[in-house]
Image (cartoon, grey):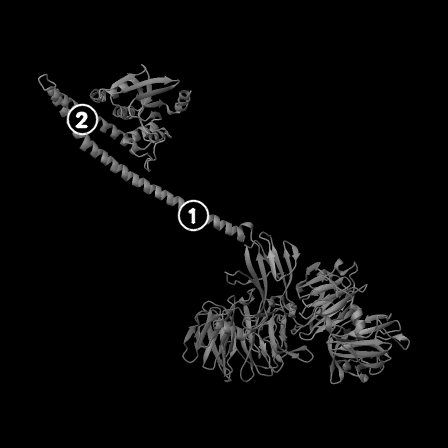
Amino acid sequence: MKFARFFILTLLSSDVLFAQESRITDPRFVVKQYTDEDGLPQNSIKGISSDRNGFIWVATEEGISRYDGRRFVNFSGPDFGGDNNRVVSLMPSVKNTQRYADFFARCVGDRVLRVTRDSRAEVTDDDNQELKRRVHLGKNDKRLLYTVRSLPYFDQSPSSSQVSVMPTSHDRAYLWTPGRISAFAGDRIEYEVSAPEVKYLFMIGKQPYTLNKTGESFQKLTNRGLMPVRLSGDILEHPSFPRRNFAMRFMEYNGKERELYTLFWNNISNQAFLYLDKKLYYVTESSGTLATRCLLNDFDIKDLIIESIMLDERSGTLYLGSSTDGLFILQPNPFHIYLSGKVGNVFYGQVPAGYESLVTPEGFQIRFDTRQKTFTSQPFLKPVSLRTADKYFITRDSAGNFYALRDKLLVKYDKAGQLVQSWPDVPGVKALYSNGKGRLWIGDVFGGLFWLDTESGNARIRRFKQGPWKEIVCMKETADGTLWLGTPSGLFRLNTNSGHLAVIEGTEGVYIRSMHFNRHGIWMSTYHSGIMLLPKGKPLVRLPADHDNYLSLTHCILEDQKGFLWMTTNKGLFQIKMDDLLAYAAGNRKRPFYFFYDKNQGLYTNEFNGGCQPCAAKMKNGYFSLPSINGLQWFNPLEIEVDVPRNGLFISALFLDGKPIQRENKIALPNRFDEFRVDVSCPYYGNRKNLVLEYAIVRSDAGLTWLPLTVENSISLSQLPYGHYTVKIRKKNGFGQDNYVYKDLEIEVLPAWYETFWFKILFFAALVSLVILVIRLRISYLLRKDEESKLYRQAYLQGQMLAVINHDIQTPLRYLVNSLEQVNSYLAQPATDPVIRETSRVAYLSARQIKKFTSNLLIFIKTQINGPSGNIISENLRVQELLEGTLEFFSAIIQSKELAVRVEALPGLTVHSNKNLISVILHNLIDNALKNTHSGEVVISSSRFDDAVVIKIADNGSGINKETIDWLNSSAGASDYFEEPDTPDGIGIGLVIVKDLCAMLNIGLYIESNEGQGTIVRLIFPAEAMVKIKRSMAR
């Protein structure tokens, strides 16, 4: 079967508070009328039904509407399949379609709408072919097929061109053809009967019935034929009910139209009703008859043009659909109001007087006829006093005598209402209470407590005690002789035997309005302090308030036989299960369920009166009489069927940023949204305050915090952080602990890009990398600091070594040189042996050379300790002076080796460098030249090449091997301070010093040598000019 999804196009709120006043005035019902002004799509009602979930569906000429007791949800618009949304009738769902539909609605043009099992409306295909198949009508059968509609309706009798079928929800169908009715069970024909005079075919429950054309006979359809059945019950008592020959509406009988009664039938609920002369009767099967029960009196069906009727048998609520005036909902009214025809309807104290009557302090006896539901009133305490009587207090003693206040006097009446005696002794009498044992307790407005012996004919009023209170509001004496006193200052306990008086802890300063005693303790109503319970032998318990805090000012507490407490307030009446309150008092701190009644449930006024005794009257026939600012309101708690919200809980619609979205198992929401709204629906037709809906937003790491839903029964969420949520919704089903039904909605708020799994992985990886990098840098830093520390220690040790060398080597050498100089001066005398004199001179010169070498060595070591970047002081130096000064140091060696040494220095030539370090370089190079030259020549020269200065040292000695030359001519960078110099084997420290100092002073070092042929060493200032000089030499 194909079908199209049907969307909700209109959603209108229609609270019962805004329903219109109705023209139906039957006092047994609270009547509400709903029209298009209240949310209906249109005012012509074509059918009424309820679905399996408890929603009420109304078919109109502008589509179909669902009602949950608070608002109408209208299904209309182009999704019907056309512009005409007019519904003609409702049709039941047969067995093979019940799995997806509760019932159907047929529109003009044979478009069909189905109501689904989850209380939605969808457009579907016409199922006439399925019906034809079930009742064995072939495809070639050209007769029109009609489904039997609700009654009253125009003539549905079959003809040669049309047949009628009555499908049912229990797998049966009835085919009505001219003169015959065929019963089908499934696809099988069960039986056929002759039906030549049938006007209407209808069902009551699961039993089919007919009504003949004359309207004189109802017949029961059986496999034996049409069996006549008679009417019984209330309709027979109607004076207009015809005993013979009666006709139906829409019929011609004996030449003119007769409208004695009208048959109504709902083809979905299979309920039948009869209307007769402004009375509506409900028709049911009973003992082989059609029993009738009167539902409505003084009900003009013509005026309202009612076409559809449905009865909720559980609650007694009646639904009426008018073709012009919309929907009427009639809820049974359990309350009855007594209004005095005389001046003033403000009532306070009252005392029962008989099975179904009471007496007021003014002296009237009021009686309620429970069968006729009517009140009567007559003077009783004579003379009746409207002006001088105190309305607050009246009581009776054990003999049935009445005590009241008249003209500030205490007066006594016998049980027949005759005045017996009066007492002027106590001015300002405020409270009266008879303990039923011969004592009348009296309180005044000055804090005094008095008593009177009611069994003594000449008794006088006696003072018993002066109390700390201003006045007494209510009193009760228990069997142990304790008198409990409710006052504006708290609850007091008075031992009438000893006179001991004590205030109950926790009630200090609390205005006690009334007390109710039972086996569980004392229940107290207060003024602005709510309800209290003093359990027997236990501390006082303050019971929780209702959601609106109406119970903070409670007037009276009454107990019925079902275990409920009834409490009157200024806002309405509460019914509370006593076991729930006792559970709270025992430690289960969950809020009890408070069932609330107000004018919407039939109260004449919401404002009750209190501060009187008795605060209400409990009659022997079970009725309660409650005083109010406008009349006495009577009801029987045993006759009230408490209409708790027992139906299911549904998520009716979801909206994201104002747009509807599809309901799924899990709702995925974007990371950024303005509003996500959940509309919740629960079919409940009682007082809206009794529908307790709460929700909680739950994350895996959070607890439950229950919040009330909005007035519109919706949940609005915005800006939820990324993650998984469960929206938990619950409804209080009524009385009892933890009596909830729950509904969950799973929500997944999608993560932002920076909250995704991969971003977190990348971020974590980057964070780990950063940590590793920081750790490595820290380790490197610590290692470097450790190396620096080691270097600092090494430099310190080296400094110490230099100090040792300077002190332990240079100092002795200096002393030795000085000594040799003196010896040599002494031996230089002509008388000295020439050999000795020469030996002394050589020794002196050698020692001086050693001292000079040691000094240069220390200078080099210091430069190495300071590093290549150490502070080197440079100056302009004359090259000629450097060369001659250095040669002077070697004069003794030159003379002893008989060498020829020439200095060819260009006059005026200068270099900018460090004198001491250049002296070390020249000293080592000249020393090597002298050592490797034997009886040869050494030439030391200087020259200028462009902007460069070149010092050349040439000898014709033994020369240098190639490996040493290559190493000396390699990159002139100083050896790394922390590594050993990579030098060839056999090279002395002198050449290492020369190479490193040249690199340090930016001096180019270039050596040419052949073994056995001599060596030429060039020092080039600056080193950058060495490349150019090498090219010039190559040419």
Q: Residues within 10 Å of mark 1 (few under 14, many from 20)?
A: few
What amino acid is found at the position of numbered circle 2 in the picture?
Ala
The answer to which of 395 and 745 lies nearer the viewer is 745
Q: Is residue 120 above or below residue 1032?
A: below
Q: Quadrant of residue 851?
A: top left
Residue 617 placement (x, y as % from top left): 58, 77
Residue 363 can be seen, yes or no: no
Q: Under tag 1, what secondary structure?
A: helix
For this view, does 44 lie left or right of residue 400? right
| Label 1 vs 2, first from the N-terminus | 1
What amino acid is found at the position of numbered circle 1 in the picture?
Ile
Q: Under tag 2, what secondary structure?
A: helix
For this view, does 253 lie left or right of residue 680? right
Q: How crowded is mark 2: few (under 14 residues within 10 Å), some or many (20 or more)?
A: some
The image quadrant where one finds the N terminus is bottom right
Residue found at x 66% / y 55%: 659
The image quadrant where one finds the C terminus is top left
Residue 123 placement (x, y as % from top left): 74, 63
| Mark count | 2
Q: Is residue 333 above or below residue 830?
A: below
Residue lying at the far top in this picture: please name it.
Answer: 907
Residue 161 placement (x, y as % from top left): 88, 71
Residue 253 placement (x, y as % from top left): 88, 77
Q: Quadrant of residue 959?
A: top left
Residue lying at the far right in this picture: please name it.
Answer: 255
Task: Look at discs 1 and 2 and give the one toward the viewer.
Answer: 2
Residue 68 can be seen, yes or no: yes
Q: Name the residue under label 1.
A: 772
Q: Residue 847 carries which label?
A: 2
For this view, does 985 lie left or right of residue 181? left
Distance (Cα) linking label 1 and label 2: 61 Å
